[in-house]
Image (tube, helix red, strand yellow):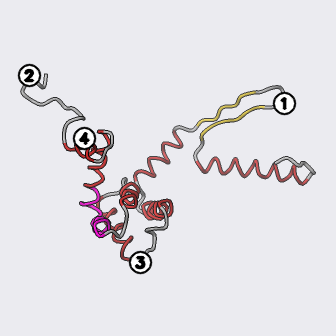
Amino acid sequence: RRTAKGERILNPNWGVGPEIAFARHQPPRSGAQYLDFCHVLTDDLVFSYDALHRGVITEAEAIIVVKETRGLTREQRGEIDIRLFSEGHQCFGLGGKKLAAMIREWALAYGSEKEIDLEARALKERYISIFPIDRHRMKITGILPTEYGVLIAQVLESLVSSAKAQGDDRS
């Protein structure tokens, strides 16, 4: 129908994204993702962009900054970007996990939509399955929100502790 109107058919293999991926020796879809990363970096995270340009941070660190601020507004991203470089944090060069954890902690202060969505999804998609193995044993599997899992772990730990106090060697 679009070709009859003289319009071009939407094709994910056309455009700048696949060309970027080709130049980077990556699959075509990753080019559009890299293009999105570049837009966020240049438009919202100007200090990170400048640091990347000057060689202060690596591309991997810049990707972490973009990824961890993804669910925030443009202004919130900019505030975290300023905070990364103005408070003299030595978070770069220490590893991606530490950098991601620090940015995630700051993002949570803004009430990140991503975290709110994950919390609602965890509650909505929770489940427990109980499988009887024989008359005396059963297997329990499931996915629970963290607060439920912590409560269950505490109950099980107290049962294990009381069993150990009575001389049971198992863990």
Q: How crowded is mark 2: few (under 14 residues within 10 Å), some or many (20 or more)?
A: few
| Residue linked to disc 3 | 88
Q: Which amino acid does label 3 sit on?
A: Gly
Proximity of marks 3 and 2: CB atoms separated by less than 8 Å: no
The residue nearer to you, when weighing 20 against 75, is 20
Q: Which numbered mark, 1 or 4, is in the foreground of this view? A: 4
Element type at marker 2?
loop
Q: How far apart are marks 1 and 4 (CA)?
A: 58 Å
Element type at marker 4?
helix
- Residue 124 - label: none
Is residue 96 positioned above or below 157 on the image?
below
| Residue linked to disc 2 | 4
The residue nearer to you, when weighing 133 against 18, is 18
Q: Distance between the residues labelled 3 and 4?
A: 38 Å
Element type at marker 1?
loop
Instruction: State which region is magenta.
Output: 40-54
Q: Residue at x 24, y 35 (%)?
A: 12
